[in-house]
Image (tube, grey):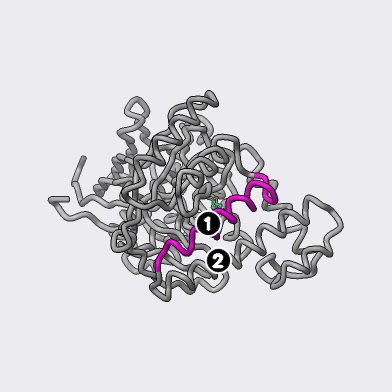
Amino acid sequence: MESTAGRWLAPGRVNLIGEHTDYNDGFVLPMALPLGVTCTAGVRGDGMVRLRSRQRAAEPIETSTAALDVSGWSELPEWSHYALGVLREFTRRGYEVPGVELDLDGTVPIGAGLSSSAALSCSVAIALRDLFAPSLSAAEIIDIARTAENVYVGVPTGVLDQSAAILCTAGHVLFLDVRTGEHEQIPFDLERFGLELLVVDTGTPHRLVDGEYARRRTECATAAEELDVPFLRDVTSPDLVERLRDPVLRRRARHVVTENARVRTVAEQLRTGGDPRTIGPTLTAGHHSLRDDYEVSAPPLDTAVETATAAGAYGARMVGGGFGGSVIALVDRENTPNVIHAIRKTFHTNGFKPPRTFAVTPAAGAHRLRDHE
Ligand code: GLA
């Protein structure tokens, strides 16, 4: 590397509640994971971009900053589009990048619904900001990382993952109003109550690029139009949804409207500092809504949720876009081994892959690492 300027880290996330609400201008409540992507970056003066990922050691990318238009990208591996998309957005928005080396290394499991892609794009975005555009605001960074994914990878995501990676703080969940960008850090101290948030990665690949995610977005836009509101966020009562004649649109809209209400309920329960066990039933209700109304769950996710709650979890739900990926479960710390054992056993009986399980606490959002970190 010509000159190593530093290392930056952006985390993955789990969303406590508020799934498929972000692109409906609604509310979300994510927290950052103690897993992330680090970007070691150095400035070059020769107009070249060198990009490497420890996870894809055989695929180093070398291109020139001048050649950062999308023609020819189809030859490049998909993971590189996230980083090159961020770079391209910097130059397209007028920030000069004279050349750069980017070395990526990640601990967020890929395809687990824990936002490894936003961790990647956000780690690159904050490295480029600190090196070439220090005046960029958090909102612009989020927009750049989201645009990279929407335009250069071709997945029409909302801002949940990028906002979580940039705005979350240790020990808190982030209550974000996507419409206004207003956000609040709400303490989420499970240890004090003898609790743990268990992540169950079902190992069922979750892919948003396959079209179902985009279809849900279109269905929501159509439902909003038929209800004569700009976004489903503007539907304030679930009763209004019953006006939709198409039963599919009715179910989709019902999920979004009730999910926004669930985010506010959980935020309020946590804000008042009471026992987090009280949020459990709302988390599970959110899962049922994703399963029945939004139809984005999958058998291993449903099985993990049912088994966890039967084994004593206070609440459990799938996280992220769906169709695979991970489940979270709120459990008493001393009951965690029992819940894990029950899930492993049921997965085995059902012929599902052995799941990967780990407990998480809310970690810090994207930042530059100090030398010893
Ligand atoms: C994916 C997308 C997010 C959000 C979630 C569902 O993670 O990237 O923008 O829509 O799905 O809540």
Q: Which residues are magenta?
A: 275-295
Residue 235 appears left or right of 134: right
Observer-nearest residue: 252 or 162?
252
Q: In terms of secondary structure, what is the magenta stretch mainly? A: helix
Task: Name the residue: 34% across, 32% down.
Answer: 55
The amino acid beneath tag 2 is Phe
> Circle 1 is placed at which residue position?
283
Asked which secondary structure carries label 2, the reply is: strand
> Circle 2 is placed at which residue position?
27
Q: Residues within 10 Å of mark 2 (few under 14, many from 20)?
A: many
The amino acid beneath tag 1 is Leu
- Magenta run includes residue 290: yes
Task: Name the residue: 81% across, 63% down.
Answer: 242
Task: Name the residue: 45% across, 50% down.
Answer: 313
x and y, in percent, of residue 327 in the image: 48, 45
- Magenta run includes residue 239: no
